[in-house]
Amino acid sequence: MSCFECCIKCLGGVPYASLVATILCFSGVALFCGCGHVALTGTVSILEQHFSTNTSDHALLSEVIQLMQYVIYGIASFFFLYGIILLAEGFYTTSAVKELHGEFKTTACGRCISGMFVFLTYVLGVAWLGVFGFSAVPVFMFYNIWSTCEVIKSLQTNMTASGDQICVDIRQYGIIPWNAVPGRACGPVLENICNTNEFYMSYHLFIVACAGAGATVMSLIHFLMILSSNWAYLKDASKMQAYQDIKAKEEQELQDIQSRSKEQLNSYT
């Protein structure tokens, strides 16, 4: 084989669909974990400075956020490894189906592993749908605060009314107790909060983290379609191999019968 033919053969064994899904999965998980970690830190800073000056009021929330940050580390590590495994499984099934390695054959263990990946990817996809929905909650909260600040700014610009009576009460979301002090911000105080770097960065980072979770869901759905298709191909390939083995055995038996018949005929003559 020439160098060009060898390169074409190697490129034919690359699972491009699995490669695209892996890149999308890594990108989504990286955005969700990185932006989510920084956004949670900024949220704690906003609460401590403006909505809950007493440390005991938000102690539980701080512990939960810290636990979520550790969970983010675990999610990033797990999906980095899982994405590589699924990509390797894509190479395996592509090589098995296209028979790029000579007499390479699929085994019952390989088909069982492919089926296990289909089930695990389905479970992870359902779980990430919940993560995607949960990541939209802080975006909704920050959007409400930002839209309230825009209302205050518009009132001040048009000079139609005072925005001092327009408030945002964080306690109604249940993230801090009702006895937290001050618990809410009104008028110019709320407008100043929206102009801080912590609020601006946290708001946009939560949006990016939510988008990353959505990209991860799409990648898992993509992986699920690929794995289901590969599992079906492997199943058909195993049946074809069984048929070819039986056919080869019958042809060998027929050749043996013919050779024995010729030997007997020669002995008679």
Image (spheres, grey):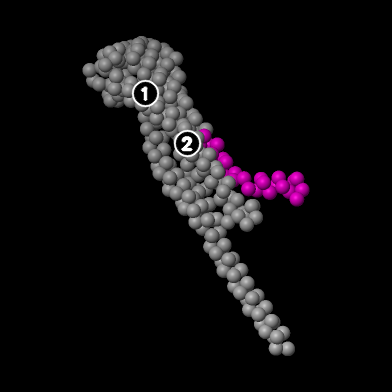
The image quadrant that residue 143 belongs to is top left
User: Mark 1 highlights which residue?
Assistant: 66
Q: Classify residue 170 as left or right of residue 112.
A: left
- Give the image location of residue 133, x and y in percent: 38, 35
Q: Residue at 77% x, 48% y: name it.
A: 2
In this rendering, the answer to whether 214 lies above or below 256 is: above
As drawn, the residue found furthest toward the left would be 179
**Magenta region, mostly helix, strand or loop?**
helix
- Give the image location of residue 197, x and y in percent: 44, 14
In this rendering, the answer to whether 127 lies above or below 108 is: above
Q: Which residues are magenta?
A: 1-26
Q: Residue at 29% x, 14% y: name it.
A: 55
Residue in the foreground of this view, choosing between 129 and 170: 129
- Give the image location of residue 115, x and y in percent: 46, 51
- Give the image location of residue 134, x and y in percent: 37, 32
Amino acid on which disc 2 is placed:
Phe
Residue 116 at least partly seen: yes
The image quadrant that residue 11 belongs to is top right
Q: Residue at 64% x, 76% y: name it.
A: 256
User: Mark 2 highlights which residue?
Assistant: 79
